[in-house]
Amino acid sequence: MKMSEALKSGAAALVLVATAACGGTAADKPAAAAVQIELPEITVTDAELEGNPFRADWTGPYGVPPFADIKNEHFKPAILKGILEARADIQAIVDNTEEPTFENTILALERSSASLNKVMGVFGNLSNTDTNETIQALEAEIYPMLTRESDAVTFNPVIFARVKAVYDARDRLGLDEQDARLLELTHRNFVRAGAALAPDVQAEIAKINEELSALTTQYGQNLLAETKAFKLEVSDPARLGGLSDDFKNALDADGNQTWVIGLDRSVYEGFMTSAEDRELRKQLFDGYRLRADSGEFDNGALAIKIAQLRAERAELMGYKSHAHYVLENRMARTPEAALDFLAQVLEPGLARAAEEKADMEKLAGFPIEGHDWWYYSEKVRAEKYAFDENQLRPYFELGRTRDGAFEVAGRLFNITLERVDVAGWHPSVEAYDVKDNATGEHLGLFMIDMFSRESKRGGAWMSGYRESSAMDGKVIRPVITNNMNMVAPASGQPALMSFTEVETLFHEFGHGLHGLLTTIRYPSFSGTYGGPDYVEFPAQVLEHWASEPQVLAEYARHNVTGEVIPQALIDKMNNAATFNQGFKTTEYIAASLIDLHWHMLTSEEAAKITDARAFELDVLKKYKIPEVIEPRYRTTYFSHIFDGGYSAGYYAYLWAEILDADGFDAFKESGDIYNPELAAKLKKWVYESGGLRETDELYRNFRGSDPGIEPLLRNRGFATPPPAEG
């Protein structure tokens, strides 16, 4: 289990451990046949911990870890000591002879594992941004160990009996809303993890959990190795036709007239869109889509095994499939409902994609292939709309764009982000103090890491080094991070962004605000709590402000002249906004279908799968996905679902688009994109509320009603006019 998953979905605050013991009231006593989880003996000496920064109080500004003092060798002894202290925390609950109460059981679980949280918060983040061979080896060792420790708590009958006793008495305890929600979710998490199952079943689940932890870690490490190993080197400048000067300069960071093209998404999209050399486009296209599908780092067999184990575990828990288990508490509720939703959007998407393909082939003069789509779609866009996306780059300098996102948040939520001098984990990291303008209260520290490097995994994401809490009268505000993988500009040159990168910056900042603004006092459901089909909403809705003319006029200025982006260029951009949506919709839904079908397999069906690519192709054929449109992710590099928290949930980005399209409609319909009444509701019920209530209720409290699919279809250009009367 990765720590990002354990933090929110485990039976307690993080990964907790326990040893079975008798004692306490009759209700607390374990069953005689309780499952036995073998936990290794751990010994950590004082000498091993001498000078370890994780064992000291961090007295620097905002509670930020002392990154300069943290070395690779500090992690393992600090983790092992944290495990021992977590065991002691749990043992204290087990040994408590008093009747179970909210304080001595539920809050005790929530408070536990503080020192382990501290070190894993750093380790988990640095393994994503600044990994190395030592960290990767430790990942492979530590995560299965933590899974065992977590299962030892989940399957400890004394702990579950105490939790259940408090839960059964919930109506008599006089709890406030947040206390009651903590109790509800703690009990739910235990049950969903298998705490109420028979001991022999628990033993099988624990074995599967440990194996999955090792496999998913290996999957992620394979993908990182394959992604970073690919290098397309070009020494002939004549082959770089179509690329902008700033893009070429970024590819030749050393200035030695050798241009190196890698697989980071921003590089990939920029090159595939602009490069005139068809053979180079094909090489990069194949390099991207064939990652980890053979050789030393083949992820195909790993993905099959992960899917098989998840199917087995779901069956042990009484579910038809892993997807049925996962979606039970999500907004879709069932995988069948998710498939029905995808089908509603796929049908117009396929029709539009066929039109787009015909337009491109007319322009190209030959049947296009997958490596042609990006390039010729831009040619068609230029012809239809007299618009080339490269025209936008000079107006989207990173610093101004970042400030534009900050300004939007300030006007919506009455906050200020002020640059502060705080050392990060890398020299390029920037830090911002986030404050409430009305009270002057410090809300959190926001740290950003924008550029790609060899040690950093691909993509863009939000994370945190410290979660918000307000237990025992002590208020702790979060340390939240945003990460992207922009190409670092050549020395002395500005960092110019594509509009896709602009939207990504706003998107991740939306996640960041979800973590920063929380008013929930318990880490278990503060901040970005919720399934992907909801948690993407606070991120995606913020993207809408990025393209509003009123907002663009504030931050989109030419990096040389300072000229505000011309309205004519904004109009061209917005007129072309729904262009190529057939392709974008189809490639995304294709990946979502692959995900759902992997995880809708019964254990019997999963056991028969022997070829990951053949399984994919069968799924794509079933839904008539054209071969020319490559799924956004293939099985061997689909880290969202095989090395992350989105298994059976990748459809969530599109589902959340129902919410964000409908939610932003409220602002547009009001005539004020900063409508203070709506902004206050959005802040209270979405960004501040974490998992205070079920996600559909939180959305209704903001919007006043359930969302419909029509705004989503309209925004993608798929809406059809109403039938004529008469």
Image (tube, grey):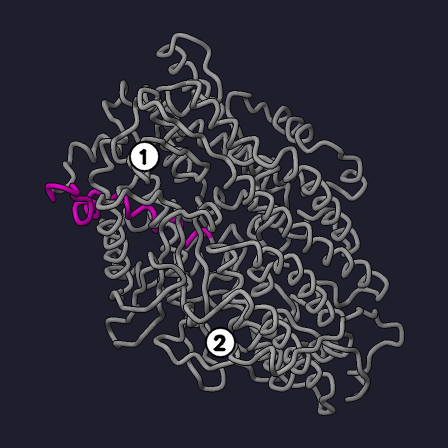
**Residue 67 in view, yes or no:** yes
Query: For numbered disc 1, what is the local secondary structure?
Result: loop
Residue 131 % position (x, y) = 51, 55
C-beta proximity under 8 Å, tags 2 and 1: no
Q: Which residue is mark 2?
A: 53
The residue at the point 38 percent across, 59 percent down is: 426
Query: For numbered disc 2, what is the local secondary structure?
Result: helix
Report how far apart the C-alphas of labels 2 and 1 lie in the structure. Answer: 41 Å
Q: Which residue is mark 1?
A: 256
Helix, strand or loop: magenta stretch: helix
Sequence-wise first label, 2 or 1: 2
Q: Tell me: 198 left or right of 588.
A: right
584 magenta-colored = no
Q: Is residue 397 above or below residue 372?
A: below
Q: Among all residues in the image, which is located at the extreme top?
A: 365
The residue at the point 30 percent across, 32 percent down is: 248
554 magenta-colored = yes
Residue 565 % position (x, y) = 16, 39
Q: Is residue 201 above or below residue 600?
A: below
Residue toward you, 259 or 425: 259
Residue 498 % position (x, y) = 30, 38
Q: Residue 150 occupies which quadrant of the picture? A: bottom right
Residue 710 % position (x, y) = 42, 38
Q: Tell me: 597 left or right of 656.
A: right
Q: Residue 487 occupies which quadrant of the picture? A: top left
- Amino acid tagged 2: Pro
Q: Tell me: 216 left or right of 367.
A: right
The residue at the point 31 percent across, 60 percent down is: 430
- Amino acid tagged 1: Asn
- Position of the C terminus, as image quadrant, is top left
Q: Which residues are magenta?
A: 536-562
